[in-house]
Amino acid sequence: MKKKEARVITCIICPVGCRARLTMKNGKITEIEGLECPRGEEYVRRELEAPVRDFFTTVRIKGAVIPVLPVRSTQPIPKDKIMDCVLELANVVVDAPVQAGEIIAKNPLGLGVDIVATRDLDRVKER
Amino acid sequence: MVKREIDIAVIGGGAAGLAAAIKAKEKGIENIVILERNEELGGILPQCIHTGFGLRYFKENLTGPEYISRFIKKVEDLRIESKLDTMVLEITPDKKIIAVNSVDGLLELRAKAIVLAMGCRERTRGALGIAGTRPAGILTAGTAQRLMDIEGYMPGAKVVILGSGDVGLIMARRFVMEGAKVEAVVEILPYASGLSRNVVQCLEDFNIPLLLEHTVTSIHGTDRVEAVTVAKVDANWRPIQETERTIECDTLILSVGLIPENELSQTAGIVLDPATGGPVANELMETSVQGIFSCGNAVHVYDLVDYVTQAGELAGESAARHVLNELPSLRKKIALKAGDNVKSVVPQIISGEEPVALHLRVKKPMRNVKVKMGNLSIPKRVVRPPEMVVINLTEKALEKLEKRDELEISIEEETEP
């Protein structure tokens, strides 16, 4: 049996924000309506086939002036791995000092990206 | 009291202020002081841990901390003095600055030029007049962001967000990532107030409901928020009582607009624009008081930091030229007025002789429009309130422009022929 479905994806490439209406058959796009440019089509296909997102969160840090260190992934990760990646980093605690760009977690979940610090945090003297 | 004479004082060490200080130093001004109320430079960016910064300015996709650290490093490399933990209390029209901190005590700086870069602050519950009790757990989005991403506290577990401004959308995602449940984002307008990429990546990605044309009518709870009542609104934003329903939550986050911070501009006698809440500025970012310049979110609220940096650079360059006696006063002055579907325009005064970028905010979304300015007509595919409209008045356009003392800018939908 042929499975027919419809989906709407908002293009975020430019401020126009076209709403692409997709008609699909067996998981494949048969028709795209509502897009005003080819860049939108490329975005919609990528969103459908392998959506990725920039990943960023914080991890705990000891010995710095603040208790959390902001981090990001070196490359976007699959959209459906965001929460897994958050959980993977939930118990990470690093020691100050840390420099921006320093690797905080190497290749978590085998995603092929590293998690790096996005700011410097110096070590503060114990009081 | 410590008294000092300096060339340029920069009030505020965020994106705008740092760009201004760097540019002024590069123009050869030695004696610059940045006055910053926080304990570190950077303004709001250290707490904006998400990406999307610098796409225009650096052609790179940076996080807030990464973006601003490039400027902080430059300020340090150029040996520009900054006073942290320092609160400016007053600026006089003759450019005397009274500030205070715990090291110098009371400070009096006399500056040849001042750059105002105080940024903006968030509208609070008081500005909305929501009925109900006054329990703990009601925070602005920026405060929640600071608690979570700088101070390491979790502000709540079950969250309703009122307003769909960018910071609210960003925080919806952060709350979910940190284990909270976001019950809904409630927006009184028929469209989201934030950028569409944030609606997609912060709400849709995490299946957070966006309730358009809805508002919070009441807050419940005594010690802590226990629930909020939401209702659909009619075309005049009046809640429709039959549609009221209660959502249990322990936290209400407000993302209901930003206001340029200009108490100091007022002590200096600077004329403010009621449409922006910021100083009236000319194309050199000079305010109504000679030698006082302004930039960034203190002038009007931007959606992208890249533009804030550019405005800071322009203000810094103008301040430097003022100190060097190289700043021309505008020979001609054209006052720009907001017309149909234009909420505000910056700068408010142009010469009509130099190329300039105009920044507009529109009141409502429109497609296939013409931006009309006197005899000029510039087509745009789409205008939306969350996205600042940039009109580049090139030399060629200015040649064509019929110059008058006052020009109205309006946005009109193209009618079908």
Image: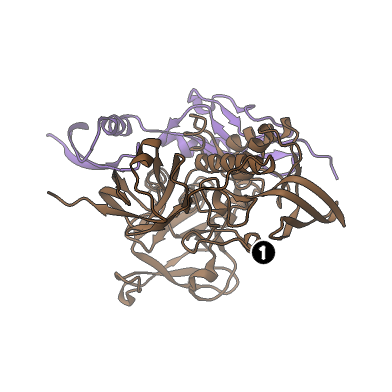
Quadrant location of residue A71?
top right
Look at label 1 and name its amino acid: Thr
Residue bearing the label numbered 1: B267
Q: Could you say which chain is coloured brown in the image?
A: B
Residue shown at the point (58%, 35%) measured from the top left: B67
Assign a secondary structure to mark 1.
helix
* Horizontal arrangement in the rendering, residue B307 relative to residue A38 (left or right): right
Query: Where's the N terminus of chain B, which quadrant?
Result: bottom right
Image quadrant in which you'd find residue A101: top right
Q: Which chain is purple?
A: A
Task: Please tell me whether residue B215 is drawn above or below residue A36 in the rendered image.
Answer: below
Residue B62 in the image, given as x and y percentages of width and height = 53, 33
- Camera-side residue: B286 or B389? B286
Q: Is residue B310 left or right of residue A46?
A: right
Give neighbour class at mark 1: few <14, some 14-19, many 20+ (Cα, 10 Å): few
Front residue of this view, candidates A118 and B218? A118
B366 displayed left or right of A74: left
Chain of the residue under the numbered disc 1 shown in the image: B
Total numbered badges shown on the rendered structure: 1
**Residue B87 at x, y percent in the picture:** 74, 56
Residue A87 seen in the current view: no
Residue at x 78% of width, y 52% of height: B109
Indicate the position of residue B296 as horizontal and vertical percent values.
56, 48
